[in-house]
Image: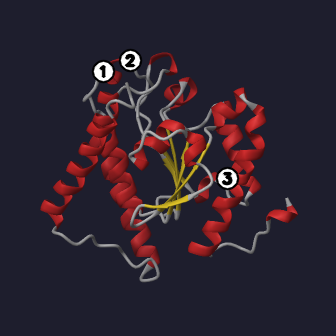
Amino acid sequence: MLEISIFEITKEIKKYFKQQSVLCGDEIYVSNRREEPEKNQQRTKFLLLDFEKEINICEKCSLSQTRNHFVFGMGNSYANLMLVGEAPGEEEDLQGLPFVGKAGHLLDKILKAIDFTREEVYIANILKCRPPENRDPLPEEIVCCLPHLLRQIEIIKPKIVLTLGRIAAQILMETTDSLSKMRGKVYNKGLFDIVVTYHPAALLRNPQWKRPLWEDIQQLRLLYDSKVGDKPNWHPAKK
């Protein structure tokens, strides 16, 4: 069902940016992060807080009737690296935070392997509410929720987005390609690049994917150093 409706989802993405152009004009303003950084950081933080207050009572789809918590996202509101997963799981739904279960603990280890902490990045999902029994998101749920994620990206202005899992990658890449076909490349989306890898939950079920995931994460860190360069030197050979 997801693959059949990918064109509908793409249409919604284009519709969102068209609406933004009507509101803000044809030019997209990108702030200079070196100019008054503390002021810019505070502004970004408050924009995210205001946006969360605006949408955390969202009832656009039926998931609002089954959720315990709306899972907005968490992390550094001024992050150059943003991680995007598929949807909250059971533990995330109970706590209202993304990636806090076993998959979240594994994600922390993955980040640590390339000298990142959770506090340095921003973490969010395609959906803000848990699908029952952790099933795949339905196309209509994605259409309702995707504009929320796109607005978060617009506010945070990450330079790199790491997608975790097939569905997150397909949605942001606007494709039906398999995860194996999307891995190993860097995709430019205009204001940011995308790197694709496995979802930590999938890794827990399939430990044989640890090596290819490590390849993806090394690629991510090297890209980060070349594109952002605000962290101490890192070399894969030392890990």
Q: Going from the N terminus, do you reach mark 2 or mark 3 first? A: 2
**Image point 51% across, 21% down: which residue?**
134
Position of 10 with respect to 100 (left or right) is left
What amino acid type is highlighted by mark number 2?
Thr
CA–CA distance in space, label 3 to label 1:
35 Å
Crowd tier of the residue under label 3, counting other residues whose Cα lies within 10 Å: few below 14, some 14–19, many 20 or above: some
Quarter occupied by residue 59: top left
Q: Are marks 1 and 2 in contact (CB under 8 Å)?
A: yes
- Depth check: give the residue in front, 51 or 136: 136
Check the image and report above or below for 75 versus 7: below
Crowd tier of the residue under label 2, counting other residues whose Cα lies within 10 Å: few below 14, some 14–19, many 20 or above: few
Check the image and report above or below for 180 versus 153: above
Q: Secondary structure at mark 1?
A: helix
Measuring from the top left, give residue 168's x and y in whole percent. Answer: 48, 41
- Depth check: give the residue in front, 16 or 93: 16
Position of 94 with respect to 23 (left or right) is right
Q: Are marks 2 and 3 in contact (CB under 8 Å)?
A: no
What amino acid type is highlighted by mark number 1?
Ser
Q: Which residue is mark 1?
A: 62
Measuring from the top left, give residue 129's x and y in whole percent. Answer: 41, 29
Where residue 216 is drawn, which disc sits there? 3
CA–CA distance in space, label 1 to label 2:
7 Å
Circle nearer the viewer, 2 or 3: 3
State the residue lying farthest toward the right: 238
